[in-house]
Image: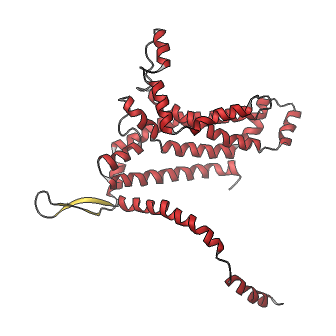
């Protein structure tokens, strides 16, 4: 049979392709559109609108109209919004390295041949991740409050006074500690799973060559789990940019956390306290685009080393 004849014979088969794949995809596409694309589109639409006064008289009439990029300009020049990013940077410098460092350390310890009670240790490290963020913030908040903190009781008994967990410079460490406590277990599981995927032959060859457990961890295991470290680093970075629950929960316990301590708190205030939804939508879009750009740049910088891609 010639090539043309074979192609003609295959054409009806292509035309009779089953619609089953599209039917299976339809529910996912509907949910994706309804709960992701539509809200994003509506947020962008709101960010381009605004209330303007029109009509005669000193007060006129307030009506919603197209204002272009005015809300974006207002968000980018808002001192509350920009100062929140400064506090977020200090928080991230503490939280991200601590989360990744402890996750890697625990994963390496669990993967070591000499470690005992691995199942119990793995579960104990992971359990804090299962605690909701608000509950974790309340638990740590009571440990931070001078009137209820056992740490302050000990320092007062020693004549050292109370520990200022919720004021001054220690405040950043106190807030970051909640995220570290809750996030180490999740990241540890990802890294530990990657470690378990390293072929046993490679590790056995290193041991035969005289490598100690420390040398095996630093020179063999860590380089082979770089993709997992990049993934967990990306998760930690995105989580840092989205910090909201911890400072909001701790805010009634201290006067050092303002209503605009981080960008998401500023967005919440503009949307639900000041009733300025367009400005809040513009700030939300800026934060989402910034998070996307940071994620893309991080992946571009690390994809050659981590994933072997050009």
Q: Residue furthest left?
A: 57
Taking the image as shown, residue 95 lies to the left or right of residue 277, namely right
Q: Residue furthest right?
A: 208
What's the image's color scheme?
secondary structure
Taking the image as shown, residue 202 lies to the left or right of residue 185, namely right
283 to 214, vertically: above or below = below
127 to 148, vertically: above or below = below
Q: Position of residue 6 (x, y in %)?
A: 78, 87
Residue at x-position 72% and y-position 38%: 222
Q: Position of residue 46 (x, y in %)?
A: 36, 60
Residue at x-position 33% and y-position 48%: 272
Of the pair 282 and 275, the residue shown nearer to us: 275
Say which quadrant the C terminus sits in: bottom right
Residue at x-position 82% and y-position 44%: 199
92 to 150, vertically: above or below = below
Residue at x-position 74% and y-position 32%: 118
Q: Position of residue 2 (x, y in %)?
A: 82, 90
226 to 255, vertically: above or below = below
Give the number of callouts.
0
Say which quadrant the N terminus sits in: bottom right
Q: Position of residue 249 (x, y in %)?
A: 42, 36
Taking the image as shown, residue 298 lies to the left or right of residue 77, namely right
């Amino acid at each position: 049979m010639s090539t043309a004849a074979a192609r003609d014979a295959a054409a009806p088969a292509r035309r009779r392709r089953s619609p089953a794949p599209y039917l299976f995809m339809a529910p996912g596409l509907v949910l994706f559109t309804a709960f992701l694309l539509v809200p994003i589109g509506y947020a962008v639409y709101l960010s381009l609108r605004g209330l303007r006064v029109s009509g005669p008289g000193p007060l006129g009439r307030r009506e919603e109209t197209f204002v272009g990029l005015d809300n974006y300009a207002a968000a980018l020049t808002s001192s509350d919004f920009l100062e929140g990013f400064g506090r977020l940077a200090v928080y991230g410098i503490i939280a991200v390295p601590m989360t990744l460092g402890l996750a890697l350390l625990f994963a390496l310890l669990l993967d070591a041949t000499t470690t005992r009670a691995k199942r119990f240790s793995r579960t104990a490290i992971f359990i804090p991740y299962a605690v909701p963020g608000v509950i974790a913030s309340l638990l740590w908040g009571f440990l931070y409050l001078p009137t209820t903190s056992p740490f302050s009781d000990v320092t007062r008994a020693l004549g050292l006074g109370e520990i200022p967990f919720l004021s001054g410079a220690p405040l950043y460490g106190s807030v970051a500690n909640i995220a570290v406590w809750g996030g180490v277990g999740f990241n540890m599981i990802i890294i530990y799973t990657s470690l378990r995927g390293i072929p046993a032959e490679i590790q056995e060859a290193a041991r035969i060559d005289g490598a100690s457990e420390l040398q095996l961890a630093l020179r063999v295991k860590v380089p082979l789990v770089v993709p997992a470290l990049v993934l967990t680093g990306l998760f930690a970075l995105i989580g840092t940019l989205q910090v909201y629950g911890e400072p909001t929960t701790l805010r009634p316990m201290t006067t050092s956390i303002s209503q605009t301590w981080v960008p998401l708190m500023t967005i919440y205030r503009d949307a639900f306290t000041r009733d300025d939804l367009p400005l809040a939508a513009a700030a939300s879009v800026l934060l989402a685009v910034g998070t996307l750009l940071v994620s893309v740049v991080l992946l571009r910088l690390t994809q050659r080393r981590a994933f072997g891609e050009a």
